[in-house]
Amino acid sequence: MTKPLRRDAARNREKLLCEAAGVFTEQGLDGSLEEIARRAGVSIGTLYNHFPHRDALIDALLPQRLAALDKFAARAEAEPDAWTAFTRFIEELLGQMTADRGLLEAFTGDHPAAAQLTEACHRGMSHLSTLLQRARRAGAMRADASDEDVVHLVWALSLLGETTGSPVWRRSLELVLDGLRPTNQPIR
């Protein structure tokens, strides 16, 4: 049974999480822990008292942000058209990933000690696979485009968005999606 935190300790923990969100969004998951502590107005020792290693901080922060994927998937599931469901999910996913460098790195990085993060990423992949299977069954997607192909394309587009800005990845996404359509399907 865990002992509840004192009020000041709970306040420090919340400040650390808030500042970590900002640092990780700006700098990625390798963002400075010292910077997080400084912004929160606490010592680095206080940070380590709450989060003994980087992955503990990541695990406390990112799974809630990754829960947005569950919302994207629920909206996609409610969409009657398989192609529209898939494309909206991808667009929402890329919108999140290009706006939040930490989230992008959560998907593409390796954080074995962050068990909740790993579980959330697996859920996101499961959502994507389900949408891809649905689009293939509906004949809306090329049969030879594997889940892995699509993951690589999303990853590449997210990096493009991170380095050049939102308008570029959106235009490139249109081209990628057109390439995923079966050759007998009209392009939008």
Image (spheres, rainbow, N blue to C red):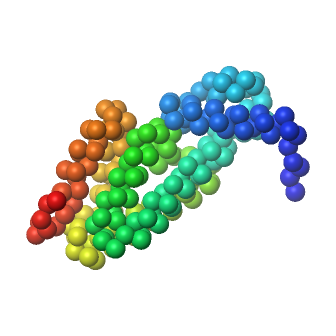
Q: Is residue 38 left or right of residue 87?
A: right
- Res. 37 in view: no
What residue lies at 36% left-to-right and 43% top-to-bottom? 158
- Res. 23 in view: yes
Q: Is residue 137 above or below residue 124?
A: below
What residue lies at 65% left-to-right and 36% top-to-bottom? 18
What residue lies at 28% left-to-right and 45% top-to-bottom? 170
Residue 110: % across, % down: 51, 46
Q: Is residue 181 above or below residue 31?
A: below
Q: Give the number of callouts.
A: 0
Q: 125 or 69, which is in the foreground?
A: 69
Residue 15: % across, % down: 71, 34
Q: 15 or 121, which is in the foreground?
A: 15
Q: Is residue 136 left or right of residue 2?
A: left
Residue furthest bottom in the image: 137
Q: Is residue 130 left or right of residue 64?
A: left
Q: Is residue 58 above or below residue 131?
A: above
Split into 4 quadrants, where in the image is the C terminus? bottom left
Residue 46: % across, % down: 78, 30
* Residue 179 placement: quadrant: bottom left
Q: Is residue 7 left or right of residue 89?
A: right
Split into 4 quadrants, where in the image is the N terminus? bottom right
What residue lies at 38% left-to-right and 59% top-to-bottom? 89
Residue 132: % across, % down: 33, 67
